[in-house]
Amino acid sequence: MSVRITWSAEDNGYVAVDNTRPGCSAVGATEVEAVQELADARKAWDEAKAKSVSNRKLIQKFFELPLSKRRELLGDYYDRADQGLPEMEKSLQAFSALKADGKVDDFLRKVATVPEQV
């Protein structure tokens, strides 16, 4: 465990930084409290990383699906995409719109249910 602890006047407390997890830090009134808080920060960091890896795999799976299945999964988002674009770019545009609407998690849950061999 590689932890750096420093005093932060800005945070009015001690900051514990996990040097093995980029951006993972916590603040506490004492050095001990900062390290204890860092345990929660590490857990959250690890969960976020796992979700990120999982999401990347599902997005890759989606773009490897046949066009007909991508259209089905994207539904109205695909229909609203610029019809003058090549098929892959329409899928990308539709996915971007879906992301902008905050519906990526629901969409990826649907992708996860698609059998590997479609």
Image: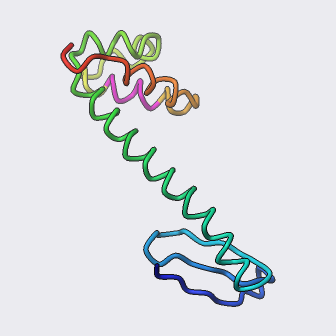
> Residue 71: x percent and y percent?
33, 12
How many numbered tags mark residues here? 0
97 or 113, nearer to the observer? 113
Range shown magenta: 90-96
> Residue 82: x percent and y percent?
38, 19
Q: Residue at x 50, y 30 (%)?
A: 104
Q: Residue at x 46, y 23 (%)?
A: 107
Q: Is residue 75 above or below residue 82?
A: above
**Colour theme:** rainbow
Q: Residue at x 33, y 23 (%)?
A: 91
4 or 68, nearer to the observer? 4
Q: Is residue 52 above or below residue 101?
A: below
> Residue 115: x percent and y percent?
27, 16
State the quadrant of the C terminus.
top left
108 or 44, nearer to the observer? 44
> Which quadrant of the figure has residue 13?
bottom right
Q: Is residue 117 above or below residue 14?
A: above
> Which quadrant of the figure has residue 11?
bottom right
Q: Residue at x 60, y 72 (%)?
A: 25
Q: Is residue 115 magenta?
A: no
Query: Is 65 left, or right, of 18 in this rendering?
Result: left
Is the magenta region chiefly helix, strand or loop?
helix
